[in-house]
Image (spheres, grey):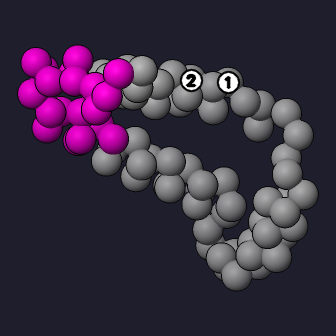
Amino acid sequence: MRVPRTFAVAIFVVAPLWGQATSIRQEILSVFDGAAKRALALAEAMPQGKFAWRPMEGVRSYGEVCMHMAGSNFCFSRMPD
């Protein structure tokens, strides 16, 4: 997978601002962990009977969106260090 040039440049410009105590990897993992916790809390708050709800025809249901988010996490976890 190719990293967009603007993203790579941003990392090299912003990385020194994080300081020596926190590595870039730890910061990224912290952001992903927070997002995962919020997504899980949102899925747990929705009644199970509402997972089939769609805002309109041809759009993913709420449950399908949750499965899409969960599947993307497997993609990120398979990326090499």
Residue underneath mark 1: 78
Residue ID at (85%, 33%)? 1
Q: What amino acid type is highlighted by mark number 2?
A: Phe
Q: Quadrant of residue 59?
A: top left
Q: Position of residue 23 (x, y in %)?
A: 67, 63
Residue ID at (14%, 24%)? 50
Is 52 above or below relative to 16? Answer: above
Residue underneath mark 2: 74
Q: Are marks 1 and 2 in contact (CB under 8 Å)?
A: yes
Which of these two is toward me, 27 or 9? Answer: 9
Q: Position of residue 45 (x, y in %)?
A: 14, 38
Disc 1 crowd rating (10 Å Cα; few below 14, some 14-19, many 20+) is few
Horizontal side, residue 20 vs residue 34: left or right: right
**What element does badge 1 sit on?**
loop
**What element does badge 2 sit on?**
helix
Residue ID at (67%, 24%)? 78
Magenta stretch: includes residue 18: no
Q: Position of residue 20 (x, y in %)?
A: 69, 75
Is 41 above or below relative to 23? Answer: above
Residue 68 seen in the current view: yes
Q: What amino acid type is highlighted by mark number 1?
A: Arg
Horizontal side, residue 32 vs residue 47: left or right: right
Horizontal side, residue 20 vs residue 3: left or right: left
Residue numbers of the magenta segment:
39-57
Q: Quadrant of residue 36?
A: top left
